[in-house]
Image (cartoon, grey):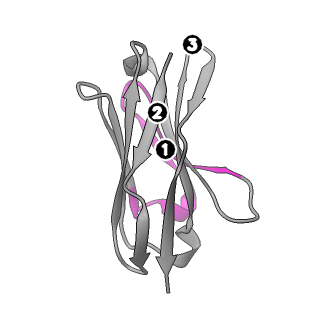
Amino acid sequence: QVQLVESGGGLVQAGGSLRLSCEASGSTVRFADMAWYRQAPGKQRELAARITSGGNTAYIDSVKGRFTISRDNAKNMVYLQMNNLKPEDTAVYYCNAAAFGVSRWGQGTQVTVSS
């Protein structure tokens, strides 16, 4: 069973950077497609970035060119490097792992971008 723990959130000024980390445990992590979702106050949770087990990546348009998702299978880690942050990036960011028809979530980490 995969368990996920996020870290790295915080308060940053617009234009700044943060790096989120997701530590994954479980024997099936290396087979999982990993993703970062985010949920802003009063809005639905949305997919921000995804990386497949094979390393292919995808991003929503609003973060393309600013965010980079990566994974280190040897360390069971997934990262989200966020640059040139904007106030509209403020949200709780959740790590997600999907493998063999099962989806797991972390507890989330708050990212707040001040203008």
Q: Is residue 108 magenta?
A: no
Residue type, mark 3 in image: Phe
Residue 76 in the image: above or below residue 93: above
Q: Position of residue 112 (x, y in %)?
A: 50, 71
Q: Position of residue 61 (x, y in %)?
A: 56, 59
Residue 67 as seen in the image, left or right of residue 110? left
For label 3, the residue is 100
Nearer to us: label 1 or label 2: 2
Residue 73 as seen in the image, left or right of residue 100? left
Residue beneath the point at 41% across and 24% down: 53
Sequence-first disc among 1 and 2: 2
- Please tell me the numbered disc located at residue 7: none
Query: In this orientation, which residue lies closer to the viewer: 53 or 14?
Result: 14
Magenta stretch, residue numbers:
45-67
User: Crowdedness of circle 3 by 10 Å Cα count: few (<14), some, many (20+)?
Assistant: few
Query: In this orientation, which residue lies closer to the viewer: 3 or 48?
Result: 3
For label 1, the residue is 58
Q: Secondary structure at mark 3?
A: loop
Sequence-first disc among 3 and 2: 2
Nearer to us: label 3 or label 2: 2
Residue beneath the point at 40% across and 75% down: 12
